[in-house]
Image (cartoon, coloured by chain):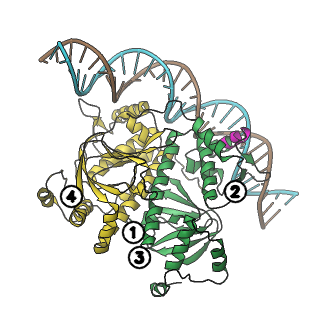
Chain colours: A green, B yellow, C cyan, D brown
DNA sequence: CGCCACTTTGAATTAGCTCAAATTCCGTGG
DNA sequence: CCACGGAATTTGAGCTAATTCAAAGTGGCG
């Protein structure tokens, strides 16, 4: 577990080597890949503690005192918002390179649960250490701000999706978003494995699990997706653009309303 | 919408402030009011340019190159998200002390329109100047991060509201949120003036303007609100807690679903 | 093999939408 | 000051997308 004192000992550009993993990850590092660059920067500058996670593990919990941000190095997480009256709402999904925990900054405690959807690894980024590191490497501040900015924009898109699309279009848009997210991370996108149950998807998308199921069946009937044999969580997307097209087409013909 | 994350920190009874001279604002400044403190800090450290805005004025527009953040010193703004296929979605409302423009950081251009709902004033905070100022005054970074964090939490609450509440409860929650927002800023809350048309509210809340109107009529019939004579935009809220109670009560009895 | 959780599909119900008509408000010009 | 016209709002009636309730079907795993 790296302490602040240790952290400083790494000269910028020198990576703290971990036996086994570091070499492999450096091999995988392609310059120009913003996500990999960010991970690389964080590793070099902060040598973050790594924490293995498995499906269902809680990275942080609502109400817990805030002190760390987290960056997802592999796997998938869902962010679950909780209301005082007991409602639960999946409000975001996180992929490799995404940051978790920004919601805790304002009042020094997290306002959501962050739960792993799969085996993976998060890096622990103590907030104070990050701020301290920004003095030497302003790039750290830049990547953090970009991540926060992106999160704000992303949640606005979610809200727009829920407010303006039909259920079936929302499901299609969700699949498109998932495919795009993993494509941007260099993973194959033609065949995706959803890490969520129908109930979780429905919760995230603001519809019942039955409606999710019906929408998926309909999308399959329309050839926009295919179920990979054995297991209804593996889905083939022959053409992501076709999915996008479906979403656009399913809009009301005249969406021009606001002033 | 429920903005749980915003609830803490602010001491009620803080000064309601009007745009005006620095001297008058200093007189009105009450220590312990986080919003006033932030404005004070920004004024002292950055002496931001002030920009008067009137209803309909665009503070920034989607696609425009990012270089400034803005802080609302008075008035109200809506944030409108735009999709490539022409949908418009009001995704946030901004009050005195709120920051605008975070969405522009990630890709160096704004992704939304920010539009004034009323006469007011924004302060222009050049992002680079802000970062530079943070070296001398780390508190600047703190308030900025808190604002971003709050915005993330707030949008998650909006998403939860849209996904889990009935239309009528959403309208009630919106009124509660508006009342609470201005209460926290020291303004009277028993009688509020909505700055939005039924169509704008409906867009923000994910329903048609007719449903907004019907919901308001029903809430009035149930004595949870009253229309102030002459003008359907002035609303009296006899008891904010009663509104909150209505929202909670209108939940499905057994909201326990996820896993 | 058999249980259990998840998923699919159907049928009936309903919340909210669409379409339409009346009403109110407000600014503008006479 | 009042009349007029357009825009916003309200309200009603019918419709539809999505929900609820229910029953089968499927797969994973001890």
| Residue D23 lies in quadrant | top right
- Tell me where residue A127 appears, x and y as whole percent: 43, 73
| In front of the other: B71 or B5 | B71
Residue denoted by label 1? A108
- Mark 3 crowdedness (10 Å alpha carbons): few <14, some 14-19, many ≥20: few
Q: Which mark is residue A190?
A: none
Residue denoted by label 2? A193
Residue A221: in magenta span: yes
Residue denoted by label 4? B14
Marks 1/4 in contact by CB < 8 Å: the verdict is: no
- Tell me where residue A159 appears, x and y as whole percent: 48, 47
* Chain containing the residue with disc 1: A
Residue at x 42%, y 55% (from the top left corner): B103
Residue denoted by label 3? A128
- Mark 1 crowdedness (10 Å alpha carbons): few <14, some 14-19, many ≥20: some
Kindly indicate whether the residues beneath marks 1 and 3 are on one polypeptide chain.
yes
Q: CA distance from mark 2 to mark 4?
A: 52 Å
């Amino acid at each position: 577990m790296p302490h602040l004192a240790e952290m400083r000992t790494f000269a910028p550009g020198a990576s703290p080597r971990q036996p086994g993993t570091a070499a492999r990850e450096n091999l995988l590092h392609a310059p120009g890949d913003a996500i990999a660059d960010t991970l690389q920067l964080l590793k070099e500058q902060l040598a973050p503690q790594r924490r293995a996670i498995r499906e269902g593990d809680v990275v942080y919990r609502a109400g817990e005192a805030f002190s760390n941000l987290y960056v997802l190095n592999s796997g998938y997480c869902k962010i679950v918002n909780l209301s005082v009256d007991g409602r639960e709402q999946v409000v975001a999904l996180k992929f490799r390179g995404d940051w978790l925990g920004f919601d805790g900054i304002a009042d020094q405690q997290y306002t959501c649960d962050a739960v792993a959807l799969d085996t993976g690894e998060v890096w622990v980024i103590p907030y104070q250490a990050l701020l301290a590191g920004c003095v030497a490497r302003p790039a750290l501040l830049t990547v953090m701000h970009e991540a926060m900015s992106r999160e704000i924009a992303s949640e606005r898109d979610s809200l727009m999706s829920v407010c303006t699309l039909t259920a079936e279009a929302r499901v299609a848009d969700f699949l498109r978003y998932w495919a795009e997210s993993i494509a941007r991370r260099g993973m194959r996108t033609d065949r995706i494995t959803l890490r969520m149950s129908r109930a979780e998807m429905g919760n995230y998308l603001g519809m019942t699990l039955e409606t999710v199921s019906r929408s998926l069946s309909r999308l399959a009937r329309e050839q926009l997706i295919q179920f990979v044999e054995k297991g209804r969580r593996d889905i083939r997307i022959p053409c992501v653009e076709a999915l996008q097209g479906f979403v656009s087409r399913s809009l009301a013909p005249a969406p021009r309303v606001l002033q």
